[in-house]
Image (cartoon, rainbow, N blue to C red):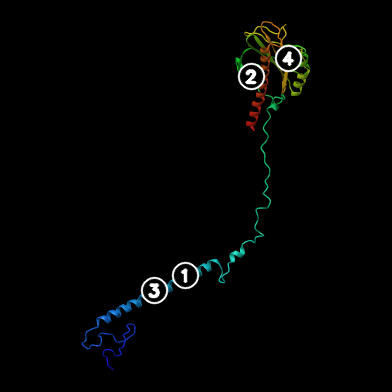
Amino acid sequence: MSYGQGGPQSQWDPWKPHSQQPWNSGNDDGTPDWAALAEASEARKKRRRLLFIGGGALATIAVGTAVAVAVVSANGDSDGTDQRGSQLPSSADIPSGSGPAPSFEPTSAPPPLDPKDFISSATKDKAPLSAESLFPGTQLTMGETVYKKGPTADTGDCASAAQGTLPKVLDDNGCTRLLRVSYTKDGVAVTVGVAVFDTEAQATEAKGQADDESVVSALSGGGIDAFCNAAICRSTTNSYGRYAYFTVSGFTDGKDVTTNDTAVFSTGDDLAEFTFRQIRRRGEAQASAAAAAD
């Protein structure tokens, strides 16, 4: 067989053992065919790269398979079914939001104490009581009007400090004390008398029995001249709790009071209003103290 140009040549396979290497291109001078060697080296590199790429793809497929197996193993049994889903309650067993709302035992705070309860009976009205505690200070301000305080008095003989039909009214209903205080302003004076009973019913009865002739005795002194001894004066009657309170107001110069003397009327009304507030405050103070003690 001829090895000349154009004849068949044995191909060298670098991966096949004992294959003939192309050291020449048909010449017999023993010089290596460097071009053939370079081509063979490049062929080996390409084949190696193909092997590496193929191996990496296989590894990727293997890892993906392992992950898939792990996911299936975590979520179900070997048969691929999810057993945890079968353990969930059915939709019929799940409570819906349309069911009855939970009920709770009703609770309520105790009602606040009624201040009037403490001034309606001697059994609960235990705070200290005097003309000075009901009418403290040296003057009284109602709105923009200032009244100067005069003398005070306190007696257990209620009839002795009353005039007209009032002594009998007080005695018949069991009056235990009669507290008095006087105020003055611009020649007008007023005396307030507070009659104390054991019960609210007694005070209410005394108020109902009093008439135009039921008058508390005016209290003078301490800078207030005698008034309402013989002159016509204006009087009022009211009650709150176990207390009945009366006013008599007139001029310190002895002049009779007429319906046109608005200063006399307003003075009596101011002192009657202040007396009511002071009795109510007495009940509020005792109610607060009782609530704080509970």
The answer to which of marks 1 and 4 sits earlier in the sequence is: 1
- Pointer 3: residues within 10 angstroms few (<14), some, or many (20+)? few
Quadrant of the drawing holding the N terminus: bottom left
- Pointer 1: residues within 10 angstroms few (<14), some, or many (20+)? few
Q: CA distance from mark 1 to mark 2?
A: 97 Å
Q: CA distance from mark 1 to mark 4?
A: 111 Å
Q: Amino acid at mark 4?
A: Cys
Numbered circle sitting on residue 133: 2
The answer to which of marks 1 and 2 sits earlier in the sequence is: 1
The answer to which of marks 4 and 2 sits earlier in the sequence is: 2
Numbered circle sitting on residue 158: 4
- Pointer 2: residues within 10 angstroms few (<14), some, or many (20+)? few
Label 2 sits on a secondary structure element that is helix
Is 6 above or below relative to 288? below
Q: CA distance from mark 4 to mark 3?
A: 124 Å
Quadrant of the drawing holding the C terminus: top right
List x then y, in percent, for residue 235.
Answer: 72, 13
| Front: mark 3 or 1 | 3
The answer to which of marks 3 and 1 sits earlier in the sequence is: 3
